Image (spheres, rainbow, N blue to C red):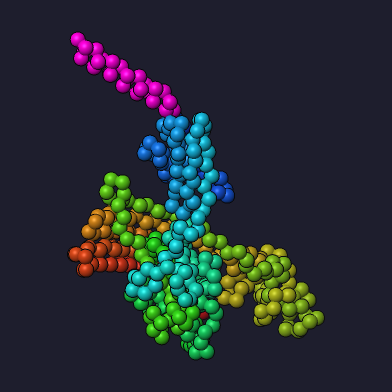
């Protein structure tokens, strides 16, 4: 009987102690923001050092955690200084985390896929991320670099997606006229010719170069290596600098396979056109130059058909809408051809649609990207269409051996306007 009473008394005591401990615990709530903007921070880790429990903030930066009177909470997030807070009797704790630059170290891809700390490099570099390149929806990589890299000058023609692009890093470096940097795509050099044409009288066209074949939607980041020290990594061809392009690799989603979709549409319009007068036609007043015309400025045939003097000066008679024999012998109304210059140009609409499928495991990863580009040009009836397929995959055979496979296929159709005048 005594043993039974002793066991019962022990259970009652354990129950009371447990109930008291539970009564002392409570739910603490709060919001975590980032300094100095005060934006909510999702994914911040909150750890109770006393009870060894923890939680994370939601998308709005809010959290809730069960704490006791002696709890000490640690708030931590990558790139931000951690904070410790003693809970005490508080029921709500709001935290503002500050960035800690010492915890982050920028790494830059240099030669042959090697990563180096940006602080350890002996030359200047600039890195442009993927989201900055596709934000505006430019059809080629070089145009997307406008204003994003200091010391880099981008020049391109007005022909749209097929216009050649000229890149200069830190200005003109050679008296020979060859100032293009070396373009390296995933370790493979691309021959990017100079955008010049010395045969002015025979051929005035500026053709596209190698940069036009690179799809911005497949790029992960671009590193621009400047200065002579950067040339040591790639030899004399990099004396004008290096534009190092790294393409996207396979990543896994929450449930394995990941699908990305990106689409954009852009509209171009000519900003300025020449202004022409629409009051007088071709010709010359008789008091300025006598070309056999009558006082009203017209010439008249024996049949009484009027024409204008054979001159290109637009100071002739005023337009009156009456019939007049044109240069080809056909009678037409004598009126101004308004906006005839503007009719030679489009207001082009361009679109870019990209779909990518990717996955990644411990030993392998792949990314398959399909892109459709339809780019209209400013010139009338001019258009460029592209179908682009990109495959980037890798397989780790063992700790020492790795196999990479990269395939890039481009099917391009360019339509240009051809104007031919015949007598």
> For the point 42% across and 44% down, which residue is it?
45
Residue at image location 36% in from the left, 39% down from the top: 52
Residue 55 location, quadrant: top left
Residue 330 at x, y percent in the picture: 58, 71
Residue 92: x %, y % from top left? 51, 33
Q: Nearer the viewer, residue 116 or 202?
A: 116
Q: Is residue 174 magenta?
A: no
176, above or below 354, in the image: below
Q: Residue at x 34, y 23 (%)?
A: 18
Quadrant assignment, res 375: bottom left
**Lateral position of residue 61 relative to residue 235, left or right:** right
- For residue 36, say whether it is visible: yes
> Is the magenta region chiefly helix, strand or loop?
helix
Question: Which residue is more in the foreground, 11 or 334?
Answer: 11
Give the residues in magenta: 1-26
Is residue 137 visible in this depiction of the protein?
A: no
Which is nearer the eye, 273 or 227? 227
Measured as percent of width and height from the top left, residue 265 is found at 46, 55
């Amino acid at each position: 009987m005594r043993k039974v009473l002793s066991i019962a008394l022990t259970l009652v005591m354990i129950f009371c102690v447990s109930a008291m401990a539970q009564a002392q615990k409570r739910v603490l709530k709060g919001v975590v923001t980032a300094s100095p903007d005060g934006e909510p921070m999702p994914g911040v880790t909150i750890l109770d050092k006393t009870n060894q429990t923890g939680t994370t903030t939601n998308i709005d930066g809010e959290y809730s955690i069960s704490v006791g009177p002696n709890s000490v909470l640690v708030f931590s997030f990558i790139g931000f200084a951690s904070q410790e807070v003693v809970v005490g009797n508080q029921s709500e704790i709001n935290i503002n985390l500050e960035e800690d630059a010492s915890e982050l170290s920028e790494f830059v891809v240099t030669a042959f896929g090697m990563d180096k700390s940006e602080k350890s490099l002996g030359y200047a570099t600039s890195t442009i991320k993927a989201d900055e390149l596709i934000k505006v929806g430019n059809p080629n990589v070089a145009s997307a670099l406008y204003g994003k890299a200091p010391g880099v000058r981008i020049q391109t023609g007005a022909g749209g997606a097929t216009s050649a692009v000229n890149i200069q890093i830190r200005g003109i470096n050679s008296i020979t006229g060859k100032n293009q940097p070396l373009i390296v795509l995933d370790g493979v050099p691309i021959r990017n010719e100079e955008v010049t044409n010395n045969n002015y009288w025979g051929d005035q066209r500026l053709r596209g170069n190698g940069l036009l074949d690179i799809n911005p939607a497949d790029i992960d980041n671009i590193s621009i290596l400047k200065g002579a020290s950067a040339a040591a990594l790639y030899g004399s061809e990099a004396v004008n600098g290096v534009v190092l392009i790294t393409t996207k690799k396979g990543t896994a989603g929450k449930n394995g396979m990941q699908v990305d979709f990106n689409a954009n549409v852009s509209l171009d319009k000519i900003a300025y056109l020449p202004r022409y007068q629409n009051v007088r036609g071709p010709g010359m007043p008789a008091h300025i130059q006598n070309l056999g015309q009558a006082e009203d400025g017209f010439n008249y045939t024996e049949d009484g058909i009027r024409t204008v003097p054979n001159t290109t000066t637009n100071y002739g008679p005023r337009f009156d809408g009456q019939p007049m024999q044109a240069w080809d012998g056909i009678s037409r109304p004598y009126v101004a051809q308004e906006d005839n210059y503007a009719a030679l140009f489009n207001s082009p609409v361009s679109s870019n649609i990209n779909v990518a499928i990717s996955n990644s495991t411990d030993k392998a990863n792949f990314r398959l990207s399909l892109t459709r580009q339809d780019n209209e040009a400013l010139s009338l009836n001019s258009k460029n269409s592209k179908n682009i397929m990109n495959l980037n995959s890798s397989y780790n055979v063992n700790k020492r051996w790795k196999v990479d496979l990269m395939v890039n296929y481009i099917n391009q159709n360019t339509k240009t306007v051809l104007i031919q005048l015949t007598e």
